[in-house]
Every structure is written in structure tokens, then in C-alpha cells.
Amino acid sequence: MKNIIIGTAGHVDHGKTTLIKALSGIDTDRLMEEKKRGITIELGFAHIPNDAGYNIGVIDVPGHEKFIKHVLAGIGGIDFVLFVVAADEGIMPQTREHFEILSSLGIDDGIIAVTKTDMVEEEWLEMLLEEVDDYFRGSFLEGKPVIPVSAATGEGIDRLKAEIIAKCDRENKRREEKELFRLPVDRVFTMQGFGTVVTGTLMDGNVKVGDDVVVYPEGTKAKVRGIQTYGKDTGMAVAGQRTAINLSGVSKEDIDRGDIVAYRDAVTVTSMIDTELSIFSSSDRVVLNNSRVHLYCGSDEVLCKVILLDRDALSAGETAYAQLRLEEPAAVRRGDRFIIRFYSPIITVGGGRIIDALPAKHKRNKPEILKGMDVLNNGTVSEIIYAKACERRFVKQSELASELGLLSHEMAEAAKGGLEDGTLVVLPDGTIISDTKHLRLREDAENIINGYHAENPLADGIPRQELISRLRERWFTDDDKLVQAVLKNLLMQGAIEDRGKSIAISGFSIEYTDEQKALKDKIDAMYVDAGIEMIKNDEVFALYKDGRIIRAMLDDLEAEGSVYKVNPSYYINKQAWDQAVDAARSFEGGFTLAEYRDRLGTSRKYAAELLPAMDKAGITVFDGETRRVVK
């Protein structure tokens, strides 16, 4: 069943609510104050019964300028507009404001209803229809049906309803894939016996009873306990339906209008957005760089500062790239439309589209930044993925898919070409980077390792953890797993070598001077001569003034298999170590330190150093009194 959402628009007291009642039988003014004052204050909701089998929801918005924020909370999710102009008044201030808002939000279809025709003469109506035609010429409403109606007499109502059905036959814009689900909250309340209920227009995807969801931007987890669409219980709601969701695990106080209910990672929580921003051609206001404005996106409202990236001011009819720096986090998706209003006085001045939901903080008047914005605004999906993969920020392939509003298979298909030709690289942890960024990361790692080799020429490599720590600092990340994924990728490519506790440039080998070679051979001979009766490290380090060189030689001898490190104070000749291990393994059952000392033929001093080393190596196990060999 096709699901369509219609939104009303038009000046206050032009008959929007009365018209909706004539079409649906539902009075959308539910508040006592609305009925008392005769004007719509809050969003109203209805559905139009029909024989075509469509779910046609209607969002009735306030016309009064004081309630524009309520208009913006509901009108962004509509498929087409029912634009209302009263025959007795014609084009009025909120007619213009609503129209420019709709244009900015990307609404591209609609029907014009000229109401209150029973209140004017035929000649006046003809003149008014010409005025309407002139006003909308050149816009998305040019050539759309213009239906004169009277809710009081019923004239034109059937024709208008037929035009609505005909337009529903053609409308099919929504994506219903499950992982795209998001519901901007325009109402939240508590229902006795049920708990917390949120309502909104289901923008994308679908949701089922029992699903786990998240309330953004706070990230509060909840479960879908029940669903209603158009006042009826259902097990599932899909994009394009007015939806009420009963949530468990979250209280009314945890949710505000403007929050987004979505699946985990289906939206991007951000404090900055890159945008293409336009000022209404009718606006008499100029937006200056660093202006503070109200941002309306979905059902959310947040204050932000406008950073114009290529100029100092943006005037009526102009469009430019701008970074909006939000004073509170918002949950958005690339491609979302928005409206801005002045901070004071609160006047609607323009709007635009999000082209990057999670950008870096930009400097102004930088050609490379503006060039990148062009790619994000006008490029293909593959070009946009490559641009995002070039950024300093690290992002996983799945996260980037969510950020761009792509399904997993769409992301894989868009990245396929880049992965095949090598312009994109996916690291073992799923992080996606460009070829140029990969080269920079490789150069960073190689420079750090080569620097360590230069400072420590007799070390077989930089200690692994030191390298990870230095790369974390270099790449501005706290993610050890990310750094390890980069290193694993470089290891697979053969750029670096894993030498156990250290990492070296591929092909690196220690080169000793003749004097150093002689010293190394002397140290090796000392351990051979000592045998079981080990030499303490202090004696070896006393042979040369530079302790780093002695340490490097011991590490080298250990790597070559000439000596074995018993503990921080002792090394032992490898053959002597094997002899010591064989002595332990010669016992059939448990044995004591004294028994082992006698079997090995050494002193208690050395036996007491060797046995704990065997425990640590998993050769023996100690129960507090005796040891036994691990089978």
C-alpha cells in the first residue's frame, strides 16, 4: 500500500484547517486555545479516506507568523504540498514565507487550493486566479492544478480530492529499506498504561514492534513496544506514514521534539555541518559571516553560527558554501534540507542542504576547501566516498555508509571500483582510506621507524608499543586497534617487518663495527663459559660505557638464539638453558628446589633463578611447595 504525506501551507485564516476537515472529516485543531482563537497553533494531523487504497496523511500547519517554528517541525517530511490561498485575500505575507520555505526544503510538487470561493464574485475570482498564476510562475508549482473550492458549500471538494488521488498515483519517493529507518519526533507524551509515546512522520525505512532503537542525539536505547499508524494498531510502520511509537526503556523526560528515533548508527550526531546555503530572494536581510541563527532541520531547532567560506556576507538571492557550527549536537544525514531564521528578530531568511554531516573545522577563503565542497555537493557517490576517505578523520566503511545515507550493498558497489584500482584501501578493522592517505600513513610509520633505527643503530627495531603510541599522537587518535590495523596492512604489503617485540623497516639489519663485533663475540663467549652459573647483567654492562649498545647486543644474541632471557637480571647460554629444562623434565613427579639443585648440579642461587623462569614459560607449575612439569 502506497503511503503519502501531504502538508498544508498558506497564510493565517485562509481556511487550511477547514479544508482538511472537508476532505477528511477530521478537525485537526485539537487544543482548546486553537478552538477558542480560531487559528491553528500546533501541528494537526488527519488522513483522507479514499477508495484507491492509499494511506494519505495530512499535516496541517499553522499559518500565523508566530508559529512558523511549528510549521518547520512538520513540513519537511511531506511528499507534496496542498498550498492554500484564500479567494478573498490572495497572496499574503505568510503565503510568501511558506512558499519560500517549501522551495528551500526541496518540495517539488503540489496542488494549489483557492479557498472561500463562496465569499467572492466570479469576476474577482478570475482576477485572483490570474494573480496566483503569476505568483507561482517559474516555480515548482507552475503548471500544477489550481482548484477553486468552498468548504462551506462543498464546491470543488470532490475535484480537489480526485486531484490528490491522481497525484498519489504518481508519487513514490520514499525509501523503505529497514536500515534507513528514522522518525523525527514532533510530539512526545505519556499514555497511561502504555508509557512513553512519540509521534512523527516516518521519513525513511521501516520499523517493527520488538525492534531495538536509539533516541538521538543523546543515544538513549529503547525498544519498540507498540506502533500505531492513522490511529490503528499495527506491527510495522513504513516510510511515508504518520506514526506513533510506544517506547519502553525510556521516559518522556528523556525525549524532546526534534530528537530522532532510529536504528543504531542510522544517523550522524554532529556539532558541525557543511552546507550549500541560500538566502530567499525576497529577504531584506543580509547574513554576515559569524552570524548567529536558528537552524531548523527535520523537527529539530538548534542555535548555530554561520561561517561563510568564501565571502563576508550573503545577500538576498545568493547561494554560497557555509559551515554551520551548532551550539548543541543534532542528529542528521547528508542531503537533509534545512531552514535558517535570524536570531533576533526571528525572521525566516533562507535555507539549504547538508553536503557533509561530519566535516572538519574549516578555515575561510581556502581554494582547496571550496574545491572539496564542490565535490561533496556535485560529485558522484564514488567521488564523494574518495573525498571522505582522504580526510584526516578515520572512518569505517560501515560508518561512512550511514553518514552518506547508503545501504551496505550500495556502499560496497560505490567503493568497488576504487578498491579494484587501488585508489581506496580498506584496513583490517574496516577503516576506509584513500591511496594518498594510505601513502601518508605509510610514510609516517616509516619515518618514525627509520628515526628510531638512526638513534638506535644496534636495536633490531622500535618497540611495538612505542611505535603505536607515537603513531597515535601523530594521527590524533586514541584508537590502538586502528593503529594496529594500519601496521597490519603495512606488514601484509611487506613495507615493515614484525620482529616479535619490535617493528623494523623491511630488510633492516644491525651492522656492527669491527670493535663492536669483537665485543659481541666476547659477550657470547662469556655466557658459553658460564654455562648454568649465569652472569648477572651488571657484569656485562660494565664492559662498555654505552649501555644502549650492550642492550642491543643482548637483544641481538637473544634473537639469534645464542642466549635466553631468564629474567630482567640474568641471561643464560641457550644450550645451558636447554640443559636446565631437561633436568626439570627428568623428574617423574613433583620436586623441590633442593632436589632440582642437586639434579642440575648447581648452587641454590642459580636454581632459584631458573625455576621461576620455567614457571613463566609454562614448562613447570609451582603449587607453593613443589613443582611439576607441565605435560
Image (cartoon, rainbow, N blue to C red):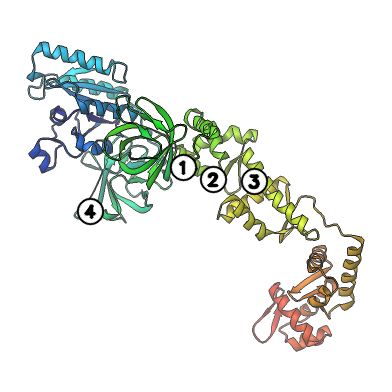
- Asked if disc 2 and disc 1 are in contact, CB closer than 8 Å, the reply is yes
Q: Secondary structure at mark 3?
A: helix
Residue 137 quadrant: top left
Question: Which type of secondary structure does the marked residue at label 4 adopt?
Answer: loop
Residue 52 visible in this rendered orientation of the protein: no
Residue on which disc 2 sits: 393
Which mark is first along the chain, 3 or 2?
2
Q: Amino acid at mark 2?
A: Arg
* Marks 2 and 4 in Cβ contact (< 8 Å): no
- Name the residue type under label 1: Leu
How far, Cα to Cα, is label 2 from label 4?
Answer: 43 Å
Q: Which residue is mark 1?
A: 358
Question: Label 1 neighbourhood size at 10 Å, few (<14), some (14-19), many (20+)?
Answer: many
Cα distance in 3D space between marks 2 and 1? 10 Å
- Which comes before the other along the chain, label 2 or label 1? 1
- The residue under label 3 is 441
Circle 2 residues within 10 Å: few <14, some 14–19, many ≥20:
some
Tag 3–tag 1 contact (CB < 8 Å): no
Q: Position of residue 122 (x, y in %)?
A: 10, 12
Amino acid found under the numbered disc labelled 3: Leu
Q: In the image, what residue occupies the spot 66% across and 51% down?
A: 487
Residue for badge 4: 194
Left or right of 364 on screen, residue 150:
left
Determine the secondary structure under disc 1: loop
* Sequence-wise first label, 2 or 4: 4
